[in-house]
C-alpha cells in the first residue's frame, strides 16, 4: 500500500522559539492512528511513533528497509523473544524499550534509554535531549505509565522553568493532514515541561543515528 503522509510536521511551529531551541534533523513522515487503514485506536500510539522514527531512518540513514507495519513490528518482537507468540495480532501496546529493540534489529542502531522516575522533574534530562538533537538529530520516542500515551519528541526549547518539548502526537484520526491544521488542533505542539504529569514515570528512547549517512 502506497502511503502519502505529510512530512516534517513540526516545521513552521519550530519558528516560534528561534533561539535556545534544538530540533530533529532530516525528513520524516507523520504516522498516526488509522493512517494506513489499520484501526489501532486506543493502543497503537507506540507503534505509530516507532513508524515515524523508522521513516526518518529510511529517509536519512538507511533506505534498505521500508517502514514496518504494526504486524511486522509485532513479528520482530516475537522473533527476538521479547514477546510470546500470542502477541502477534494482539492489541498490546509497546513502549520505548520495544522501540529500542526494533530499531536495533532493523537498522543496527543502538538507542539510549532515559528513565524519569515519578516525581522527578523533566528539567533534569533537558540537557541530554538538547545534546541528542545536536549530535544525532533523530526523533525521540517518549512514553509513560499514568500518562501512558506514547508520543514523538521533535525538539526542545530551553528556557529554565518555561522550557518546552516539541511534541508530535500519533493519536490523531482523520485525513486532514496539513501542517496548519495539525498545529491548530494541537496534534503538533510545544508542551511546557510543567504540563507533564509528576505522578507518571517517563521512558525516552533516543536512537543514536546521525542523518545523511546512507552511504556510510
Image: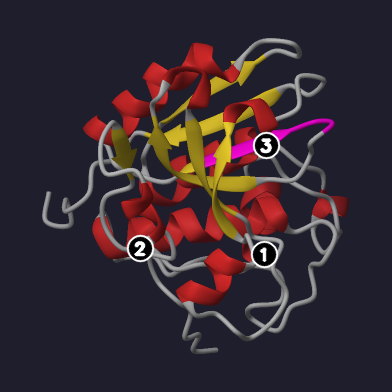
The front one of 145 and 93 is 145
Which label's residue is closer to the chain start, 1 or 3? Answer: 1
Q: Give the quadrant of the N terminus.
A: bottom right
Predominant SS along the magenta part? strand
Q: Earlier in the sequence, mark 2 or mark 1?
A: 2
Please, is residue 79 above or below residue 35 in the view?
Answer: above
Q: Residues within 10 Å of mark 1 (few under 14, many from 20)?
A: many
Residue 143, given in percent of the width and then of the height, sits at 67, 37
Name the element at disc 1: helix
Whether label 3 touches label 2, CB < 8 Å: no
**SS assignment at label 3:** strand
- Look at mark 3 in the image and give the residue it sits on: 143
For the point 76% across and 42% down, which residue is it? 83
Q: Residue furthest bottom?
A: 2
Which residue has dot 1 on it?
Answer: 70
Q: Is residue 157 left or right of residue 185?
A: left
The mark closer to the camera, 2 or 1, is: 2
* Residue 108 x, y percent position in the rendering: 36, 42
Q: Place residue 35 in its image quadrant.
A: bottom right
Tell me: 153 left or right of 171: left
- What label does residue 12 carry, if any? 2
Magenta range: 141-146
Amino acid at each position: 500500500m502506497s502511503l502519502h503522509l505529510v512530512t516534517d510536521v513540526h516545521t513552521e511551529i519550530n519558528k516560534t522559539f528561534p533561539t535556545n531551541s534544538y530540533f530533529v534533523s532530516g525528513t520524516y513522515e507523520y504516522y498516526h492512528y488509522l493512517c494506513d487503514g489499520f484501526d489501532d485506536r486506543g493502543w497503537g500510539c507506540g507503534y505509530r511513533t516507532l513508524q515515524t522514527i523508522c521513516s526518518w531512518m529510511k529517509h536519512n540513514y538507511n533506505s534498505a528497509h521500508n517502514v514496518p507495519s504494526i504486524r511486522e513490528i509485532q513479528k520482530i518482537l516475537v522473533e527476538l523473544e521479547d514477546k510470546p507468540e500470542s502477541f502477534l495480532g494482539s492489541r498490546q501496546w509497546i513502549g520505548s524499550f520495544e522501540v529500542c529493540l526494533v530499531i536495533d534489529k532493523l537498522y543496527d542502531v543502538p538507542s539510549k534509554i532515559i528513565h524519569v522516575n515519578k516525581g522527578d522533574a523533566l528539567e533534569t534530562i533537558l540537557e541530554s535531549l538538547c545534546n541528542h538533537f545536536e549530535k544525532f538529530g533523530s526523533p525521540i520516542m517518549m512514553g509513560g505509565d499514568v500518562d501512558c500515551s506514547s508520543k514523538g519528541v521533535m525538539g526542545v526549547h530551553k528556557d529554565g522553568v518555561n522550557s518546552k518539548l516539541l511534541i508530535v502526537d500519533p493519536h490523531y484520526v482523520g485525513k486532514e493532514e496539513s501542517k496548519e491544521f495539525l498545529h491548530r488542533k494541537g496534534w503538533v505542539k510545544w508542551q511546557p515541561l510543567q504540563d507533564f504529569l509528576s505522578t507518571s514515570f517517563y521512558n525516552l528512547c533516543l536512537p543514536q543515528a546521525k542523518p545523511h549517512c546512507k552511504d556510510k
